[in-house]
Image (cartoon, rainbow, N blue to C red):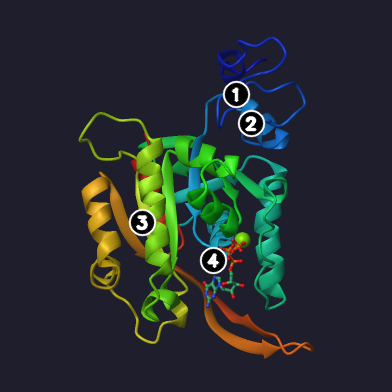
Amino acid sequence: MTSPYVQEYNGLSSGCACPLCGAPTYEGNGCNTCFLPFKVIESIQSRPDMPRFVGVLGTSGVGKTVYLGMLLDLLARGECGLHGLARSPFTLTLHRKLILALERQRFPEKTPIESDRWDWLHCEITAGRKKGPYDVVAPDVAGEAVVGELESQGTYKTIRALIARCAGLVILIDVVQIVGDGKGQELFAMQLISYLDALKPRKRNRKIDVPVAVVFTKTDLCDEPIRDPESFARANTSALYSLCQARLERISFYFSGVAGSTGRLIDRDGQEMLVPLRVEPRGIVEPFAWMVQQLR
Ligand SMILES: Nc1nc2c(ncn2[C@@H]2O[C@H](COP(=O)(O)OP(=O)(O)OP(=O)(O)O)[C@@H](O)[C@H]2O)c(=O)[nH]1
Ligand SMILES: [Mg+2]
């Protein structure tokens, strides 16, 4: 049986429209415009309804891979009233990479910059009785690609297409850098919101309707527990906070942490490495749960 989705996009005889950017694609190939891999197109086409694309974005080293891998683990078990069922084997690759790394008391490898090497997730999400189930698709992108696209638009077409198309956005911010008085993380998040603003068509003077969750990561490394993320954002990232209030219709602030305790190892080359000694995920599902509740 052909799914309604395929029929809808079968205007072209040789293939279908790319579910991410809308450009024509050809049978058996990924998208030549935004580089959405064929396996993702195929997985989406096998489903009856169009998925929601979600962006989980942040600079390199902010914790995207760790966050997404742990999110998949918790969703598979069912947390915060959310259940996630992997809809494709490639979803399990991202999940497995994190779990295998944590089992060895390591963090996963950094994500390669080439978009054809990114892992993707495609999950069916059930959020209680009121909503769903519906599908969510998200890539685990490299931070350099996000920064590169913000700095030179059109350089990383997958990132551009994702920001233009996303139904929801999770922006990760490294809390250690914020507490250390660095402005880079805040400026990155502001640039990303401005880019979203530029790409999302809407009526004049209206705020951006896409729900945005701002997540301060690695809170396990903070000396002081942070109790109220919104007050923390207002006090420590005031320019970002004001921009969010001015431009976003739906915004919420969160904290997350995956490691319960960490240690520092020095390898043979004298390189220092942070390793997780204990795994104690906190605040992983909450931002995602808020965001999927907002998705229309
Ligand atoms: N303490 C602590 N450290 C973390 C946590 N998450 C990530 N880290 C550290 O941050 C590093 C980078 O995490 P990744 O998830 O690989 O970061 P990323 O955003 O995917 O980075 P790119 O792949 O380069 O874009 C890890 O190797 C850890 O050292 C966390 O929850 N707690
Ligand atoms: Mg990564």
Proximity of marks 4 and 2: CB atoms separated by less than 8 Å: no
**Pointer 1: what residue?**
23
**Pointer 2: what residue?**
33
Within-10-Å neighbours for mark 1: few <14, some 14–19, many 20+: few
Proximity of marks 1 and 2: CB atoms separated by less than 8 Å: yes
Q: Which mark is residue 63?
A: 4
**Pointer 3: what residue?**
190
- Res. 80 in view: no
* Quarter location, residue 200: top left
Foreground of the two, 25 or 99: 25
Indicate the quadrant containing the C terminus: top left, top right, bottom left or bottom right: top left
Within-10-Å neighbours for mark 3: few <14, some 14–19, many 20+: some
Q: Return the disc, 2 or 3, that comes first in the chain's sequence.
A: 2
Say what secondary structure mark 3 lies in.
helix
Is 126 above or below relative to 243?
Answer: above
Say what secondary structure mark 2 lies in.
loop
